[in-house]
Amino acid sequence: MGADVKTTMKVDMTEAAASRIAKIVAGEPGKSALRVSVDGGGCSGFSYKFDLVDERNDDDVVIERNGATVLVDELSLVYMGGSVIDFVDDLMGQSFQIKNPNAVASCGCGTSFSI
């Protein structure tokens, strides 16, 4: 895939997401970033996976904002290009949500989608 994918497909995060990620990572000794990836499976075909990590891989795209770092691998970037990672705190609860323009359908849980 190479550098073309990294430069043409972008993932962003809102200020709310950055603030929450920075707070979570600060409370986890040895962790430095939130990794967001796409896995096969889930009720709509693909699902998002969130992991706290301490290392970057060579193929990671690094998104930084207000002291928060998010890592997305090149393969996941293919499915997530143009997405915005948000953190929502409302009556339904707190959660990270990904607004993905590539998804044509998603399920009620908000972590599964199809393209």
Image (cartoon, rainbow, N blue to C red):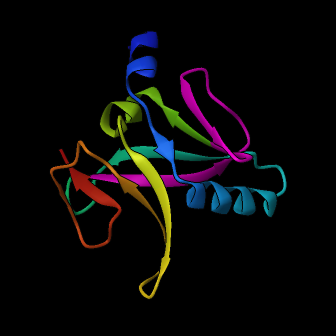
Q: Residue at x 56, y 28 (%)?
A: 60
Q: Quadrant of the N terminus?
A: top left
- Whether 70 is among the magenta residues is no
Q: Residue at x 51, y 36 (%)?
A: 72
Spot occupied by residue 115 in the image (x, y as percentages of width and height): 17, 44
Q: Residue 108 lies in what quarter of the image?
A: bottom left
Q: Residue at x 31, y 37 (%)?
A: 79
Spot occupied by residue 93 in the image (x, y as percentages of width and height): 48, 82
Task: Name the residue at the bottom extreme.
Answer: 91
Spot occupied by residue 81 in the image (x, y as percentages of width and height): 35, 34
Q: Residue at x 67, y 59 (%)?
A: 19
Callout count: 0
Q: Which residues are magenta?
A: 46-69
Q: Foreground: 100 or 109?
A: 100
Q: Foreground: 86 or 51?
A: 86
Q: Is residue 42 left or right of residue 66?
A: left
Q: Is residue 8 above or below residue 29?
A: above
Q: Is residue 89 above or below residue 78?
A: below
